[in-house]
Amino acid sequence: MTRVLEKSRSLQHRAEALFPGGVNSPVRAFRSVGGDAPFVEHAEGAYLFDADGNRYIDYFGSWGPMILGHAEPSVVAAIQDAATRSASYGASHAGEAELGELVRTAVPSMEHMRFVSSGTEATMSAIRVARGFTRRRYVIKFEGCYHGHADGLLVKAGSGVATFGIPGSAGVPDEVAHFTLALPYNDIRAVEEAFARHKDDIAAIILEPVVGNAGTLIPQPGYLESLRALTEAEGALLIFDEVMTGFRLALGGAQQRFGIKPDLTTMGKIVGGGLPVGVFGGREDVMSMLAPLGPVYQAGTLSGNPLAMAAGAATLSRLIREAGTIYPQIEETTRQVAEGVARVAADAGVTLTTNRMGSMWTWFFTNQPVNNFEDAATSDTAAFGRFHRTMMDQGVWLPPSQFEAAFIGTAHGKAEVDVTLEAAKKVFAKS
Ligand code: KE4
């Protein structure tokens, strides 16, 4: 099927006159998979519709938020209703506590919290409050984990394991990267070595408990428990970055699924129901360091925005109300799609490594296990690009990168599974 993309191409040309690469976030440019990125005209349920009228099954859901599908009626109604009372006040309002109480119902470790407007703000602020509370300088992150684009988190591993981080982006000074240690994921010995090397000067470990930003990486049995024990023994804080896994892997996120209580948690995406919301929180004694109570400064013009609070509250209310059916449903649909396509590929002689948990997964184009970023990097990204482009031609829109997770929501059902498996059969038959 040759898709018409004329209108998207002219919109891309118009956008390039305004935005670097024509996008407001790099991954949308399709640079790692090739092909033209369609411009979305509207979306509904499990589907995206582009400017030329092409329809696609959406398997990235705005990178996670759209777990209830696009234009979910209760979320739309909540936003429309809130908008009639002004888009923003810059003052306290009841909607903040309404969403905050729902967050704490779903994630009890969030004793105290603060809303911000993105996942980046949430992780950046959580790290600042962890440093303020512990009065320590270093932070440990893991290769392949992405926590947003704050300078101190755009850091990659230095020369040797547990040595000082080096900038992962232009514009990040060495001195800033120095205080972030980037270690291999799923390697507890590297963490032990880092604590030995920087005794009493590591403020926190931050990680995606189940990684989505290297593609999906699953923690090895005991790994998260070891990080919890190590941080407690060393007086460092454990920060679960659940921007992606929060309300996704279970109502209570990865911490519910694995039964681990972090000191701080950062969330985003689903918590805003598609509107710009991030939230960080956890132990009340730690969060009490924040202004106006304590000496750690953090602020935001649109934090607690009434429309975003309303969208998040409508989303979490339904997830809480229907958790018993929603999570088993989306997990089963994900199993059918993830395993079904892997089987189709295998029948065509193409070996994929499928990492899946809950309703997030990744097909790695490699024939070896993928337990960390180094393993993920063995994937044949050119083959993934061909797969992505030909699935787009079949009306299946996967995340445009081998190193991203795909997502399924409540609007995906048997029809979408069947179309996806048929598309994969055509794609792999050609390869
Ligand atoms: P935002 O600042 O993009 O809202 O959140 C940053 C962030 C923090 N932590 C985790 C675990 C995340 O996955 C993210 C953002 N995720 C990417 C997709 N992998 C957002 C997509 C994009 O950058 O356009």
Image (tube, rainbow, N blue to C red):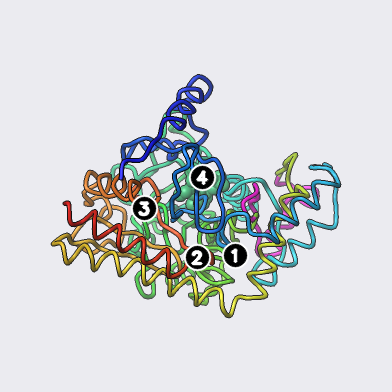
Give the spatial CA distance, label 4 vs label 3: 13 Å
Three-letter code for the amino acid on which mark 1 is drawn: Asp
Residue beneath disc 1: 263
- Which one is in front, 356 or 389? 389
- In the drawing, what numbered circle is on residue 148? 4
Nearer the camera: disc 2 or disc 3:
3
CB atoms at circles 3 and 1 under 8 Å apart?
A: no
Magenta part of the chain: 273-296
- In the drawing, what numbered circle is on residue 231? 2
Going from N to C along the chain, the mark reached first, 3 or 1, is 3
Residue beneath disc 3: 214
Percent coordinates x, y for residue 394 in the rendering: 33, 51
Quarter assignment of residue 95:
bottom right
Percent coordinates x, y for residue 384 in the rendering: 26, 49
CB atoms at circles 1 and 2 under 8 Å apart?
A: yes
* The CB of the residue at mark 1 lies under 8 Å from ligand 1: no
Neighbor class of circle 3 (other Cα within 10 Å; few <14, some 14-19, many 20+) is: many
Please identify the dominant SS of the magenta region: loop
Query: Looking at the figure, which quarter contains the N terminus?
Result: top left
Nearer the camera: disc 2 or disc 4:
4
Three-letter code for the amino acid on which mark 4 is drawn: Gly
Give the spatial CA distance, label 1 vs label 2: 10 Å
Going from N to C along the chain, the mark reached first, 1 or 2, is 2
Quarter assignment of residue 353:
bottom left
Q: How many marks?
A: 4
